[in-house]
Structures are given as C-alpha cells and as structure tokens.
Amino acid sequence: MGTTASNAPQPSVIDSLNDAPISFFHLRAAFTAGMGFFTDAYDLFIIGSALVYIKPEWHLGNDQIAFLGSISLIAAFLGAIIFGRLADVVGRKRIYGLEALLMAIGALACAFAPSFIWLLVFRVVLGIGIGGDYPMSAVLMSEYANAKKRGALTSLVFGMQGLGLAFGPVVALTLEASGLPADSIWRIMLGLGALPPLAVLYLRRTMPESPRYKALVRGDADEAAKDMAVYSSGQLEAKVEQKTKPTRIGWGQMLANPKYLILILGTGGAWFLNDYAFYGNAISTPEILKLLAPSSSQLTGSAWALMIFAIFAIPGYLASIFFMDAIGHRRLQWLGFSVMALAFAAIALVPGITHDVAPFLLLYGISFFFIEFGPNCTTFVMPAEVFPTSIRTTGHGMAAGIGKFGAFVGTFVFPFISAAGGIKGAMLFSAGVSVLGVILTKLTLPEPSGRTLEEISGEDVRTATRPATVTSRLAENQVL
C-alpha cells in the first residue's frame, strides 16, 4: 500500500517549497508582488502620454522632453542596485514595502509638481522606488515558488506589467475625452500611479521573511518552517530542523568570481538589450504613430496604442506565463529576441510599410507580442533563479539596474534616432540590438527550467533523497 500524506515523513523546508503544488498562498504572494509591477508599467509609460500636454504648457524643448521621459529609468538603475543589495544583507522582509511607499510618494508628488525641475526631481524619487521593486518582488516570488512552475509564478508577477501598459492608454483616452483642462489631464495621469502601491502596502509589510533566506542564509530552518506554515494557513508544513551553518557570499567575493561575472553579463546584458528595444519603442509609441500618420489626432494615437497593448502585448504576457516552463526559460528568451529582430527588420526594410497603417501596426504588434512572450518576461525571471540565495537579490538588482540603464538609453536616444533616420532607422537599429540579445543569451546563460533553485546555484544542501510523496496538505487542496 502506498505512503499517504498523513503518515509520510515530513520533508525539509527547501524540499517542501520545491515540491508544493500551487495553491492560494502562491497566488496571494503573486498578487502582492504583482501590483508593484502594474504600477511600474503605468508610471513609466504614462509619461509618454503626459508629455503631449506638458510640452506646450511649459514650452519644453526636445532635450527636456528626453530627460523627463527617461530620468525615472536611470533612477531605477540606482534603486535596483541599492535595494537588491540591502535585501541580501538585512533580509527581504525588512525592506519589502519601502520601495512601494517610495513609488506612491513619487507619483503623488509628480501630480503636484510646480515646474519642470521639480517634476524631474519627483520622477527620480519615483524611479528609485520602481527600481527597488524589481529584485524584491522577483526574488521573493521565486523563493516561495515550487520548482515545476517557478517560471509561471514569477512571470505572473511580471505579467501585471501588461495590465499597467494597457491601463495607461485607457486612462489617457478617458481623460482626453472628458474635456478637462490640459493641466488637469496630465496631473491626474501621473497622480493615479500612487493608488496601486498604497493598496498593497499592508500586504507587503506583513509578508513573512523568505523561508529560503531564513534557512540557507540565516541558518534558521525551524523559524522558516513556522513562517511557512503560518503564511500558507497551515496548508504547507515541513519538519522543524536544527540550526544550520549560515552561507553568505560577500559582494567582493561575488565580483571576483568569474562564474558570477558571466551570469551578471548574461542576465544584465540581455536585459539591457531587451529594455532598449522595449522602452524605446513603448514610451515613444505616441511619437512613432504620429510619424506614421501625421494628420491623426492625439485621441486616435492613444486608441492605436491601446489596441497594440491589448491585442498583442497582454496575450504575450499570458503566453509567457502558461508556456515558459514547458518551452524553457533560456530557450524562450532567445526565440523571442529572434522574432523581434525579424519584425523590426521587416518594418525597416519592406518598401512602403511605414506609410501604410494596417501592415505597420500588425508587424509592430507582433514585435510587442514576442517581446512579452520572450525576453521582457524571461530577463525578469532568470536573474531570480541563477544566483545563490545570499546574493540573489544583489544579482537580480544588478541585472535589473543594467536593464533599466538600457531602458534609459533607449528612451533617451530613440527620439534622436527616429528624428535622424525616421521609423526605418529606429527599427533597423532595434533589429540589430535584438540579434545581440540572441547571441548573448546563448553564450552566457544556463537553462533553469524544471530545476530547483538549489540545483541551479549549487546550494543543494539535502543530506537525504527527497521523499517521493510530499507531506503537505496542499496536495489535497491544489487549485492549479
């Protein structure tokens, strides 16, 4: 007779996490983290629509517009690195929620900015909070996730960015059709970004410390087991273990190790290339559509942007969530880069396509689908998998920071490239960037799909064979 869940030996904390079927506590963690990414996308991309109203009101030049559109991204570079390192040194729980508070404060302050300089300053505050949200939310979700569906769960967090992308044009269309004064429209656009992080601030501050961090870095496996049982409402249980020797890797050790340097190059470099193409195109979408159809109204441009995000980007996020683990995280990344390169090259090289709205929007939409069903999700997921626990948020923060610097470069230089070479020149450059993404992914990154975090990072601390049957009430209450 087979062993039952009631009399099987209890697994360790790590094994219990790796084997637990997806249940409500996973989804609660994903929602808590994901609302930050809804806000990230909304706050970063709504500036493109807001600038249409800010520019004539404050008589801004092209350089000022470029700085306003991109300053949050260079601030996110700093926020990702600072918060990422702090989370490895003092723990995830102690600072989780602080970055959401910064986002809320920054968004509200932007809505009341009295001048260009103050708006620039407040966008920096906002950007630091956005950057800090990347390593915190990604790593906490990956460390709570099981081995089989880790990519889907971490992608689910990032997938909230897709809703934020679509929500921006909805807000823009609603406000543009409302008849409100231009000064009120852009202030409401920017201020609404404070609501989502405030809504989940309590959930973030009450989320327990990552069980993996407590067990492997602090050596408190017994406390980790208790936290896990409480957070899962008693559904997920593990044996109480003796204290183990903490394992820590210093920042200097990390930067002196060729293995970790290659991982930083691979994760951060691919993220840089993806974000150049993604943010350069996405934030500049209103301007790109204006070049495509100069006589179209701002309302028409917002409607086209919403159509692109709703028809192509959001399904791309969903496809990534459902198929990433089956395809493979590394494989999906280079496949996505490959199709992006083809779509961008077709826009640049097919005669007449930049003067015909329907074919252009189709190819432009395909590029967005494969950005989401590919590197935009995988570059977020993989840095939360390939580094050891004691430097996981540090590694993710460095990768995210490098990525946000790529976003800054893309957002800042894209208007100049498109002004010099038109849509064709901008798209051809994005195609070359995507080809580099394929090469870098294949040369530097491992395939983490289907493997435990401990196997990937070399931290497999188990002293016995994993039990064939996991002791967890989740087996009886599985929801996915």
Image: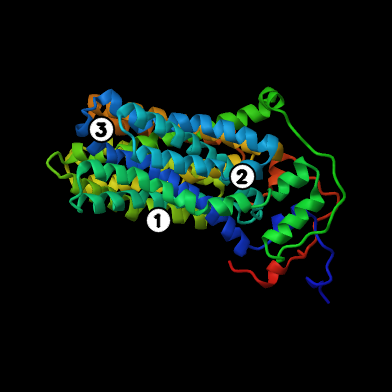
Q: CA distance from mark 2 to mark 3?
A: 38 Å
Camera-side residue: 372 or 80? Answer: 80
Looking at the image, is mark 3 or mark 1 nearer the viewer? 1
Amino acid type at image mark 2? Val
The amino acid marked with disc number 1 is Pro
The Cα atoms of the two marked residues, 3 and 1, are separated by: 26 Å
Residue mark closest to the camera, 2 vs 3: 2
Disc ID at residue 414: none
Q: Amino acid at mark 3?
A: Lys
Q: Which residue is mark 2?
A: 139
- Where residue 114 appears, as percent x and y from the top left, is 31, 32
Q: Which residue is mark 1?
A: 315
From the image, which quarter does the N terminus lie in?
bottom right
For image coordinates 68% across by 65% down, the residue present is: 233
Is 432 placed left or right of 469 in the picture? left
> Where, by quadrant of the figure, is residue 88 drawn?
top right
Of residues 30 and 442, the one nearer the viewer is 30
Q: Position of residue 245 (x, y in %)?
A: 84, 40
Residue assigned mark 3: 424
* Residue 267 as seen in the image, left or right of residue 217: left
Q: Residues within 10 Å of mark 2 (few under 14, many from 20)?
A: many
User: Which element type, helix, strand or loop, lies under badge 3?
Assistant: helix
